[in-house]
Image (spheres, coloured by chain):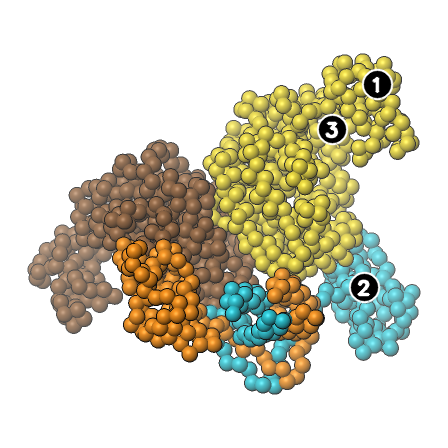
Chain colours: A orange, B brown, C cyan, D yellow
């Protein structure tokens, strides 16, 4: 997917105060829809046709960390705190979980070290680990995705 | 100097510290909540770490998260800004135990500064005037009369366990004192289940005058003159200026010496602010010391040319304070206007939302400290201050003129957003402000009369 | 699914203030829909009822001076220069034109005094004076409407 | 002081003058073309008058329109800003004949200042060094050799009627001089139908150093130190600073005295700038005097604390210049960065358009003079400068650090808009700039090498 092209299309829409744009060629097809530009000082925008629905206002809520988001049954498990990520209780030990493992809400799936304390992190859901997104020893910030877990 | 520090704060003060880091060549790691993820100062930092959800208790006040972030980012020091953990002795203690420099005074000093009674004791021992009072609870009506005669009328009776005005009475003679004593005790008993009452001399029509101090790692301590913060509403400062129009050179010298004497007596280190009440007769009384950088520090920077935040970092890094008292020269006059996203017509209720249009003033004598820009969304979780407008002129009259024209230029617009700009404009047109015939209750009286 | 790509698409939508985005190529197909974010950070406003007309935004273009604009055959005659407007050559004299008078392109219709010089201003069109928009002695800026002239 | 003045300019300097008016309590009438109708400074003025279409010749350069506006608005004075009519002696003359004060020198002085040959004569008579040369056309090859021996090699041969580099040769010895003399004459004959050639000493690797002067209504004249404007491209200054890193106290004193001597000799009044070339041996040569406020005046304001635009208005209103030379103290170091809407990668072609996003730097030591804001449309008719970023620090190294961090904060975005911000960032990283080993050709060489 050509993100640069997309970006330029959006810029063009903004500049031209378009509300919709459809584009199709051999490789791809794109349809873009945009709200009316409220930024003034430009030339007058045409009035919207009667029957158009006025825009709804508001902002999507920030995703709460550690709350899994379902995407076709696959959830992102996010870090509930800042710390250093460890897959196992000690360097010699086996990882708590591997891809393919089944977990339940009480399963410890990793450790987040913070202030010299090893915090055992539980899966908080039942499902199958489908991806481990980082390596032992990596720092993580609050809300950072750690695992993908399929619950469906 | 530190190679890398962590900024454990948000908004304009996070940006202020980031600026000092940049100019000192220090790498800056900014921690932020989810609500501040998109803030531009976060993007400007060398590294940023999300430490929690928007609620301060789970992010900017969460010590384990901040310390973890500091460890993960491998910083040598933490700047706490103001508010949040800046005067939390426990946090400073945790930093120490983790071998991270806390950019502020040592935990013991913070603890003392946070204990008003202890701070007053130290002030008394250092020969710094405090508001005279009963040294604890008043035992009986006879005691009340005796102490009031000693300290002189009018006096203030306050509940020992109290707050919020309950169990509080003023008395200007023996009759009102005795009545007030009994009423205050009953109220205190009802409100706090403790009838104990203490007495203080009532400082009439006081001005709030505070001295900026700097103390080096070796204890060498100087002051950088005063700030007058008498324009306040419910102890929330709205306008601050330096120097104070109420001080002459002699009083300035004596108050400055008192501020330094107090700081020395409590073993102070780094930047701090010694607050006084000043009555109409030129008597001043120590209130407390703030063991952090203040919101209003730029007015001192404007008149002294000294960068206080850089000095905080230098002192924390062990660098000698090589400024002598005689090096500090006050040049001209500076005034700071706090621009808060609040609606003065609705009891100063915060007005969060998206800033659609922003025009900041500029030109000669104008400094703006702000983290906001057109497109910025003011989160609803934090302090409503969105900018500090600071003006400087060769004298107070010029500074006021610059303030007027800068406020006329300032524009903040967005759905639902109201600011304190109109109230600043109105205040600058008042003879009381122009002639500085104000005290700490002036703004509240003014707002009532013009409600 | 490429979550990074998705994230970047969402960022693009936000930046470009898009409300919808559809994209399709050989590998994938994606459709994204987004709330309008006019009043952010506040509570979401309810959507307007269907059938409501969206407001027309924008600012009228700056009028070109001295170029008459036709509005149902009526033209605004605009000041070709800055000056003081006079309807007559002297205080005692009759006005050059009154409402109802016919003018041709060479008709003097007023005087604009600038730098002590009395500049006779001609109608530059044929038609009927339907309104005189200001009084003698009033200052005018460049492009300010002085008369309405019906040419239709 | 005037009750009301007219500002006959646009953009940031119109806003700068408006700010001075506000602070002096003077009403300001702004004239504008149709292209500037929506500008915010126009809205901020007490009155605004549209004077013509966008083309400068029919608006900002149209004397009758501006005088008419002044009469219609009943102003007492006109401030011409810089550029446009600011150094037009005829305009100043018309103002005088209309009993309107021109905020600048008298027309006779402007005329003299605009005549380079006459200005050089005055400088010579006042004992101010000028670039040595032939005093008119060189009559013969023998003459050329004689004069070159007198003034010393290298020399520059220039067409008397010329310009644009044609008929121009440099020579470092007799052979190249004689060859060059014949070539230059042929070229000049071809290009200008006049073979006359004059000779000047070639000032090698010169710096551009200019002195700000102020002369009161009575002729009392002082200087406010110098500005170093060596960072320029095709005579367009890009960075200016004060003081000049190339001057020591003795040279500063001598150049300052020369600047004042020249101003006195030509009967100068109001604010002006005396420009010098400074060679690597500390020899300085008068070039010309600019009889107006300069774009780069803020750096002088930052280091002296003197508001130059206010003084322009006071002097024009007949107020005494009550500053003495010894009152002028240079404090710290200031640098101005011109932020132009130009594409450095396309030969600095202007990039007009709509500014979608604007984040201005702030905090300590930062002054921004700009008339633009998010949503502003940069018109294609005028100068491409959209902002001046001025930084101040206790010394040059600190000012550079503040400049770096302020430029890092500055963001100007819009469809097609490019600015000089990246080039400033790059320049601040060059050892030549940091050590100020630059001359007036440095920037061109640098751009060529990094093309």
Estimate the spatial distance between the alpha carbons at disc 2 and disc 1, rounded to whole Å: 61 Å
Report the side of A96 relative to B377 (left or right): left
Estimate the spatial distance between the alpha carbons at disc 3 and disc 2, rounded to whole Å: 44 Å
The answer to whether dots 3 and 1 both sit on one chain is yes
| Above or below D236: residue A44 | below
Q: Which of marks 3 and 1 is in front?
A: 1
Q: Which residue is drawn at 60% across and 70% down?
A: C27
Element at badge 1? helix
For label 1, the residue is D178
Q: Examine the rendering and report whether any part of residue D143 can be seen.
A: yes
| Above or below B237: residue D315 | above
Question: Around disc 1, counting alpha carbons within 10 Å, would you say few (fewer than 14), some (14 to 19), or many (20 or more)?
Answer: some
Report the side of B219 relative to B51 (left or right): left
For label 3, the residue is D119
Q: Examine the rendering and report whether any part of residue A139 can be seen.
A: no
Element at badge 2? loop
Residue C93 image position (x, y, % from top left): 85, 65
Q: Which residue is drawn at 36% across and 34% down?
A: B323
Q: Residue C66 carries which label?
A: 2
Estimate the spatial distance between the alpha carbons at disc 3 and disc 1, rounded to whole Å: 30 Å
Report the side of B259 relative to D403 (left or right): left
Counting the numbered discs, the total is: 3
The answer to whether dots 3 and 2 both sit on one chain is no
Question: Around disc 2, counting alpha carbons within 10 Å, would you say few (fewer than 14), some (14 to 19), or many (20 or more)?
Answer: some
Give me the chain letter of mark 3.
D
Give me the chain letter of mark 2.
C
Please name whichever residue, D166 or A73, is drawn nearer the observer in this view of the structure: A73
CB atoms of marks 3 and 2 within 8 Å = no
Name the quadrant containing residue D227: top right
Of the image marks 3 and 1, the number of the one nearer the N terminus: 3
């Amino acid at each position: 997917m050509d993100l640069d092209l997309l970006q330029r299309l959006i810029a063009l829409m903004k500049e031209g105060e378009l509300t919709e744009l459809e584009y199709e060629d051999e490789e791809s097809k794109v349809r873009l829809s945009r709200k009316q530009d409220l930024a003034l000082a430009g030339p007058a925008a045409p009035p919207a046709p009667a029957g158009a629905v006025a825009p709804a206002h508001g902002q999507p809520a920030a995703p709460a960390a550690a709350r899994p988001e379902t995407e076709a049954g696959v959830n992102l498990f996010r870090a509930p705190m800042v710390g250093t990520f460890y897959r196992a209780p000690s360097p010699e030990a086996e990882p708590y979980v591997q891809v393919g493992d089944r977990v339940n809400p009480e399963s410890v799936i990793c450790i987040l070290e913070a202030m010299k304390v090893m915090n055992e992190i539980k899966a908080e859901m039942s499902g199958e680990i489908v991806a481990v997104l980082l390596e032992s020893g990596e720092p993580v910030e609050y809300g950072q995705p750690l695992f993908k877990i399929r619950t469906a | 100097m530190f190679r890398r520090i962590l900024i454990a704060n948000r908004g304009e003060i996070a940006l202020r510290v980031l600026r000092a880091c940049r100019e000192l060549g220090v790498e800056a790691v900014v921690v932020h909540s989810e609500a501040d993820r998109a803030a531009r100062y976060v993007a400007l930092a060398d590294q940023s770490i999300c430490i929690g959800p928007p609620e301060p208790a789970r992010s900017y006040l969460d010590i384990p998260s901040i310390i973890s972030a500091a460890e993960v980012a491998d910083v040598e020091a933490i700047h706490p800004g103001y508010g949040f953990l800046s005067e939390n002795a426990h946090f400073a203690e945790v930093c120490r135990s983790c071998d991270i420099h806390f950019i502020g005074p040592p935990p013991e000093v913070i603890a003392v500064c946070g204990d008003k009674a202890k701070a007053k004791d130290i002030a008394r021992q250092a020969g710094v005037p405090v508001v005279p009072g009963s040294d604890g609870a008043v035992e009986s009506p006879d005691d009340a009369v005796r102490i009031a005669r000693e300290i002189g009328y009018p006096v203030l009776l306050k509940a020992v366990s109290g707050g919020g005005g309950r169990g509080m009475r003023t008395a200007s003679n023996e009759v009102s004192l005795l009545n007030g004593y009994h009423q205050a005790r009953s109220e205190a008993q009802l409100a706090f289940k403790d009838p104990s009452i203490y007495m203080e001399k009532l400082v009439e029509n006081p001005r709030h005058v505070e001295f900026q101090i700097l103390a080096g790692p070796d204890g060498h301590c100087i002051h950088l003159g005063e700030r007058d913060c008498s324009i306040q509403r419910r102890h929330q400062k709205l306008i601050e200026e330096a120097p104070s129009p109420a001080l002459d050179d002699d009083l300035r010298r004596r108050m400055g010496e008192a501020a330094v004497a107090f700081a020395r007596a409590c073993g102070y280190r780094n930047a701090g602010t010694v607050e006084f009440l000043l009555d109409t007769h030129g008597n001043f009384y120590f209130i407390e010391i703030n063991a952090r950088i203040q919101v209003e520090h730029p007015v001192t920077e404007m008149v002294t040319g000294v960068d206080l935040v850089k000095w905080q970092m230098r002192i924390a890094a062990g660098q000698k304070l090589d400024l002598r008292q005689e090096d500090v020269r006050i040049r001209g006059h500076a005034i700071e206007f706090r621009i808060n996203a609040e609606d003065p017509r609705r009891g100063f209720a915060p007005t969060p939302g998206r800033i659609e249009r922003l025009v900041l003033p500029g030109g000669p004598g104008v400094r703006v400290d702000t983290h906001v820009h057109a497109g910025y969304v003011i989160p609803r979780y934090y302090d409503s201050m969105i900018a500090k407008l600071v003006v400087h002129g060769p004298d107070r009259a010029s500074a006021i003129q610059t303030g007027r024209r800068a406020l006329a230029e300032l524009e903040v617009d967005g759905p639902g957003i109201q600011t304190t700009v109109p109230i600043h404009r109105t205040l600058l047109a008042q003879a009381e402000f122009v002639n500085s015939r104000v005290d700490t209750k002036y703004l509240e009286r003014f707002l009532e009369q013009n409600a």
